[in-house]
Amino acid sequence: MIKLGVLCSGRGSDLQSIIDAIKNKKLNAEIAVVLTDKPNVLALQRAENAGIKNICIDRKNFTGKNDFESAILKELKAAQVDLVILAGFMRILSANFVHEYENKIMNIHPALLPSFPGAHAHRDALNYGVKISGCTVHFVDEGTDSGPIIMQAAVEVKDDDTEESLENRVLEQEHIIYPKAIQLYVEGKLKIVGRKVLITD
Ligand code: GRF
């Protein structure tokens, strides 16, 4: 059974969708550990409620990024994690970290990449005036939201959308495609060829 290590910073609704997909037998994996960079966040509570090992590695307790990432890596290795899942983890991982789990880190971003990378995707999409936005599951490389794309879902942008209303509709799609993309990985169906991810049978 493939072991997931899920990294979160806050609410953890994407984490919840993975927990639920495993429970409903849509995703054949096990969450070995949930790690957060902040204390007292809902993601920790969701993991706890599901009986999943959860640890806060509070960024504030570390002076440098290296030490912080080493502490995360130590927990991931201790839990024998095969695939790292970024689920609302609001930190950019260093190249060193990424190389430790080369092509074994996934992220979900709330826009149709390469449009609107970064921390304010919904605001940026609304300000730009796009008619369609969505979400993207991708492998993580050394850049920000720049790795090979695994799956995307489109969401219509309405004239009266606020950041919140758009976020809520995009989240519905996130909660569908993230578990699906992870299941494809579990089934060994994702093949990275340069920038492309082929979904094989
Ligand atoms: C989601 O919008 C995800 O796309 C982005 O961060 C948000 C996390 O939400 N990476 P949640 O904490 O999973 O509810």
Image: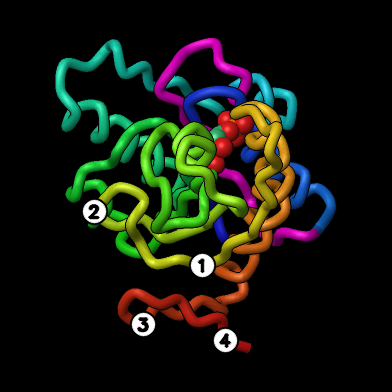
Q: Nearer the viewer, mark 1 or mark 4?
A: 1
Q: Earlier in the sequence, mark 2 or mark 4?
A: 2
Q: Amino acid at mark 4?
A: Thr
Q: Earlier in the sequence, mark 1 or mark 3?
A: 1
Where disc 2 sits, the SS reads: loop
Name the residue at the bottom extreme.
201
Question: Mark 4 and mark 3: span between their CA atoms?
Answer: 12 Å
Q: Is residue 19 above or below residue 42?
A: below
Question: Mark 1 and mark 3: span between their CA atoms?
Answer: 12 Å
- For disc 2, the marked residue is 142
Where disc 4 sits, the SS reads: loop
Residue 151 shows up from this direction: yes
Q: Amino acid at mark 2?
A: Glu
Q: Which residue is drawn at the image coordinates 70% and 42% (left, top)?
A: 158
- Front in this rendered view, residue 122 or 80: 122
Where disc 3 sits, the SS reads: strand
- For disc 3, the marked residue is 193
- For disc 1, the marked residue is 150
Residue 129, percent across and down? 52, 44
The span shown in magenta is 26-43
Residue 102, percent across and down? 30, 62
- For disc 4, the marked residue is 200
Whether residues under marks 4 and 3 lie with C-beta atoms below 8 angstroms apart, the answer is no
Graded by Cα atoms within 10 Å as few (under 14), some (14 to 19) or many (20 or more), the crowding at tag 3 reads few
Q: Which residue is drawn at the image coordinates 38% and 46% (left, top)?
A: 117
